[in-house]
Image (spheres, coloured by chain):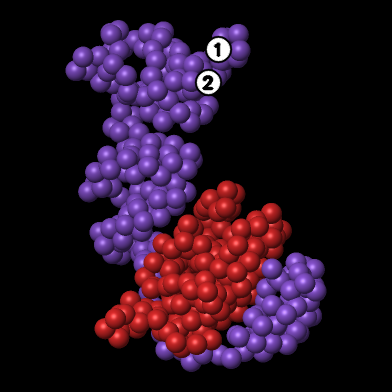
Chain colours: A red, B purple
Amino acid sequence: MLLAFADGRPFATGAAHYPYQGIGEQDNSLRVIVPVEIEGQRALAVVDTGAPYLVCAPQIASQLALDPNASLDSLRMLIRGIWYSGRLYLLNLTLLAIEGYSLELSATAFVPDSEWAESWGHLPSFLGLPGCLERLRFAVDPSTDTFYFGPLI
Amino acid sequence: MSMITHPFPAPPDEIGDRFSGLAFGFRQGRHSLRVTSGSYTRSYPATLAMSDTTGNWPAPAAVPDGAKAIGRAVLVTSAGERTALLATAEPTTAHARTERDLEMLALEAAARAGDERAFLAALDQINWLARPPEYYIRAVRLALEASAHLAARRLAAEGAERYRDHTELQKYARVLAPPRVTRSNLPPDPTIKANLEWLKANRDRYLGQWVALQGGKLLAAADHFDELIRQVSSTKGVLLTVVY
């Protein structure tokens, strides 16, 4: 059952179960990891409201045939304590649902330059708040490890 | 800050040999020094050089070509560090440029320090009405570097509104625009659940490896991403992930 307001309006229109676990790389904090599609490529991403933008793992980005001309010129961004060089794109992100409806949005995405792939290691992609999740309603139910999401309507 | 504004009792054409002020993020190289004496304010492009531990200042080779050294100053930072500021006189036409340079220097210093608060404070001091599109773009990039993401978006949007024919600024505004839901009624896909269940069931066996999954079935596994991709003929509809 999806979440709704008291007056019946939907709070969430889709939901996905998430593994609540660490992502390795000396990061043992438990994370909400959700299934997504980035420009049609399926991946996992960590919900990280402390981060900006969709941050696309360089390995995933390598499969997307991105056009650098459509991006902003290379710049530096501080991500998880490390300065990465990369580009900002406008990408299609789909939050995949196993209940209700999947939701597609156009989000600002930071894509580290390919030379950072080795340094990026096994980190997943990240769903940040500004530029990505900020215009969505979303919630987690830790009792069922369910991530709910829906548009502002 | 690479801009120093300090009331100085000496005649305005002389820097004097000592003053103090708060500073952070000073780096060797070109900066701007603004000195005031009463109601008189004068700005100088300045070269910051570091003294060695014995207090010896670097050779005059630090003076830019064509510039006239008009004095040296010792800047004592709030941490008690001593640095030298060699002020040079340049043609007065540099003065008009200096105001804009000072603004950008302030933004640059804050961005390099990753100090969003300082960046926003410096941003507030700028009158944008007379600024060209390239100035907007530079400021947006600095805002991103300073992690002032909402300010970057606002600047890009304002610049794009003012310069509607500027292609690059329009692109900045477009990329930094607020996210927009394009479809919210895509049908659920049962293969997603199957993939998640596979990951849960096989976590111990494949922990730390890259895997390619489709419909809950393992297509390939590898220690490295490049190895994984070589094993998969197409990634369409395939989940590519590390097993966490």
- Residue B57 bears which disc, if any? 1
Extreme residue toward the front, this view? A143
Left or right position of B215 against B155: right
- A111 or A94, which is in the foreground? A94
When the figure is inspected, residue B76 is found, relative to residue B210, above or below; the finding is above
Q: Quadrant of residue B166?
A: bottom left
Q: Quadrant of residue B161?
A: bottom left
Mark 2 belongs to which amino acid? Ala
Residue identified by numbered label 2: B49
Residue at left offset 40%, top offset 81%:
A3
Image spot of residue A17 (x, y percent)? 56, 79
Separation of residues labelled 2 and 1 (CA atoms): 7 Å
Q: Are marks 2 and 1 in contact (CB under 8 Å)?
A: yes
Residue at left offset 22%, top offset 17%:
B40
Q: Which image quarter is the C terminus of chain A in?
A: bottom left
- Mark toward the start of the polypeptide (2 vs 1): 2
- Chain holding disc 1: B
- Chain holding disc 2: B
Is residue B20 among the parts visible in the rendering? yes
Mark 1, other Cα within 10 Å: few <14 / some 14–19 / many ≥20: some
- At numbered mark 2, what does the secondary structure look like: helix, strand or loop? strand
Query: How many marks can you see?
Result: 2
When the figure is inspected, residue B143 is found, relative to residue A42, above or below; the finding is above
Is residue B141 among the parts visible in the rendering? no
Residue at left offset 69%, top offset 77%:
B200
Image spot of residue B119 (x, y percent)? 38, 42
Same subunit, tags 2 and 1: yes
Mark 1 belongs to which amino acid? Trp
- At numbered mark 1, what does the secondary structure look like: helix, strand or loop? loop
Left or right position of B124 against A34: left
When the figure is inspected, residue A45 is found, relative to residue B24, above or below; the finding is below
